[in-house]
Amino acid sequence: MKKNRPVLKLGLPKGSLEQATIEKMAKAGFNISVSNRSYVPYVDDDELEIRLIRAQEVSRYVEHGYLDCGITGHDWIQENGSNVHEVGEFLFSKATRQPTRWVLAVPEKSPVQSVKDLKGKRIATEVVNLTKKYLRQHGVKAEVEFSWGATEVKAHELVDAIVEITETGSSLRANNLRIVDTLLISTPRLIANHTAWKDKWKRRKIETMALLLKGAMEAETKVGVKMNIEEKNLAKLLNSLPALRNPTISNLSQSGWVAVETIIDEHIVRELIPQLKAAGAEGIIEYPLNKVVY
């Protein structure tokens, strides 16, 4: 009889971060297929079992050992007060690569200018614990109520202020709200249960997943560039272009010529290629990357 194969139980956030997370996992090499009829997705790795759970709950299930590890926001780890091991931080979100922010916001015409002005007032939010902690830090006593949704609408009629999550602030502006202060900046984190982290096999599996995720995300903002150039022009090229300070250089079969290959930030390619051409480079090729591991 074959021994049971070890399995790592991974929790991924269901909801707004779900698609972005699955895309990142695919780039890391883990292809996940989600069925509308099940919260247990298929993954092409026999050593992984995945559960789709609301991001708000992932850290609690990891802390209590129902999951070995999971991906969730730093905000929900703090809101739940979860005692977990943080493996890594990953700068991705549903709309941008920017961190999300939990902000204190009020209607544009509100007299509130700072948190001090909320003494005795009412605040609606989904992050009740974070908001209460913030108020304590500023010595302000106010009523904090849990919001089940449509929080931005409540600010105009039902409460004096809200604490809401935002990436760009566009939704708040669209609802005629202004930001008074930022309570917390949050990014997705890979977290692990302390017992699972002490398990040699599980830790190695988690660390491998973290390495591949980080490599995949590093590759998203970079491209590979290769070109041929006469050896006599190489020093000039390297001196004038700091981005190519440590490229791979190899000899070509044609005497006096070398091939240069490097990795650069994608946003400078449009400026770099004309410079390469002017420096004498030929056969310039730009190509996408799957992973960059340092």
Image: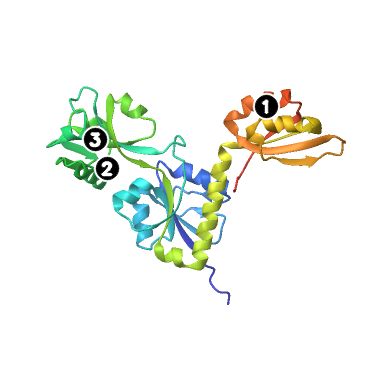
Gap between marks 1 and 2 measured at Cα: 48 Å
Neighbor class of circle 2 (other Cα within 10 Å; few <14, some 14-19, many 20+) is: many
- Left or right of residue 239, residue 203 in this image: left
Q: Quadrant of residue 218?
A: top right
Secondary structure type for disc 1: helix
Q: Residue furthest bottom?
A: 1
| N-term mark: 2 or 3 | 2
In the image, what residue type sits under mark 1? Ile
Secondary structure type for disc 3: strand
In the image, what residue type sits under mark 3? Ile
Secondary structure type for disc 2: loop
- Is residue 7 visible in this depiction of the protein? no
Total numbered labels placed on residues in the image: 3
| N-term mark: 1 or 2 | 2
**Which residue is depicted at the point 27% across and 44% down?**
127
Q: Which mark is residue 273?
A: 1
In the rendered image, residue 14, in percent from the top left (x then y), is placed at 41, 47
In the rendered image, residue 185, in percent from the top left (x then y), is placed at 36, 40
Q: Nearer the viewer, mark 3 or mark 1?
A: 1
In the rendered image, residue 111, in percent from the top left (x then y), is placed at 17, 25
Q: Which mark is residue 126?
A: 2
Gap between marks 3 and 1 measured at Cα: 48 Å
- Say which of 240 and 151 sits in front: 240
In the image, what residue type sits under mark 2? Glu
Q: Quadrant of residue 257?
A: top right
In the rendered image, residue 166, in percent from the top left (x then y), is placed at 35, 34
Q: Which residue is mark 3?
A: 162
Q: Nearer the viewer, mark 1 or mark 2?
A: 1
